[in-house]
Image (cartoon, helix red, strand yellow):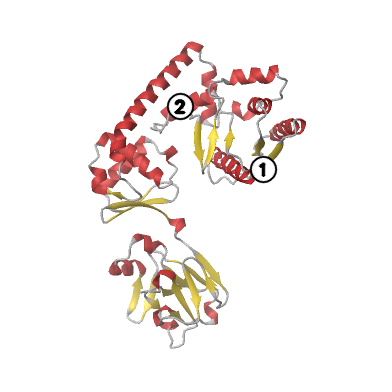
Amino acid sequence: MALLDLCTKAKMNLIVCHVNYHQRESSRRDQQIVDDYCRAHRLQLEVLDGEYDHQDNFEKYARILRYDFFVDTAQKYGCKAVLVAHQRDDDLETYLLQKQRGIQPEFYGLKAEVSYKGLSVLRPLLSSSKQDLEEYCHQNGLDSGFDETNASDDFSRNRLRKHLVKLPEEALRELWKQRENDQKSLFEFQREAAFYLEGIGKKLNLADYCAIPQSYRNYVLRCVLKSWNLDVRSYSEAFLSDLDRKLGTSSGVIPIKDGHELLLEKGVLSVFHRKDYEFSYKFGKIEPFHCPQFHLESAGHPIEGVTLYPKDFPILIRSGKADDSIQMRYGTKKLNRFFIDRKISYEDRLSWIVIENSAGHVIFVDKLGCDLSHYSNNPSMFVIKYDSLED
């Protein structure tokens, strides 16, 4: 509320955003406080109601939800930036959490300005303490609801916050001095490590990576993973060290976090997320169809054809799995063996087309054709992969 009032008094052109996560009883009260202020000052208010699905931890869910909401609202109204009310205590808490988790970040604490999906995020209150802002609200007659979840020990930030409140001013000054020294050391390290990042693109040559001095490898690996749009904020130094070790001793696929995989193929390292490649479409009848992976037609090459019978429906046209197999006239062919024989790249394997009938049997594999019982001179349909038209 202090930030909102300061911006209002500065006569800024504002759109106010409020996210109600509905995770505590006082959430409606807090929304009403913001709504009353906006009505009194004739400010446009945008409200988003959160629906926590428990798939991620709540802090991660809430962060993504609100910042995506800020981006959408900024695009709707043509806003240039979003102002958030992080203050000095938040900054110190973030620094200490980074140290506790063994994470070497790009920056210790909170930056005064960052970018999120192209939107500038500004933190103008980092020089003010929480106590300063509470006093401002009191002096200016502003309602500011107390978040009772701050007293809970469910979140590590809350536990840390309760510890910091008890520290004397001298101890806090020492923590700030330590943060400043750590930041200077980090900047110097980053300056030295920048030499090894030059020329690194979307794919990383493993020989070049292994030639980097060990003391810089975790940092370079973190930067490379971030360039692949991975959320590296939770990657500890221990996690990166283990990943570095695997790169030196493993080949093929190395699972990492959030469904992503590192692929080491022909001495080159790249990253994949299975969900970006896997697909599944169900059909209750034969019909024309187009999708990013394939299209269904009434004509095509013989190897693209399959004859379907009423008992086959519904059919599933999906991405293949390594343990899939198909019955051919010369015996059973495992999909993984087919990939190896044809030297199919890992990226192509993830989106290889197969057809599964209602009995759960694979009856068609792209480039291999249909099984013996679904072959005829007059196929019902042809499954044509878009990049196979020139093969």
Which amino acid, by three-letter code, is at mark 1?
Answer: Asp
Q: Is residue 342 above or below residue 153?
A: below
Which amino acid, by three-letter code, is at mark 2?
Answer: Tyr
The residue identified by callout 2 is: 95
Q: Is residue 107 above or below residue 46?
A: above
Residue 360 visible (yes or no): no
Is the residue marked by circle 2 packed among few (<14), some (14-19), or many (20+) residues within 10 Å? many
Q: Is residue 328 above or below residue 126?
A: below
Report, in whole angstroms, how far the alpha carbon at label 2 lies from the one at label 1.
30 Å
Q: Position of residue 75 (x, y in %)?
A: 60, 45
Of residue 362 and residue 39, the one placed in the foreground of this image is 39
Q: Position of residue 213 (x, y in %)?
A: 24, 37
Of residue 318 and residue 192, the one placed in the foreground of this image is 192
Task: Identify the disc placed on residue 83.
Answer: none
The residue identified by callout 1 is: 49
Q: Position of residue 16 (x, y in %)?
A: 67, 36
Of residue 340 and residue 359, the one placed in the foreground of this image is 340
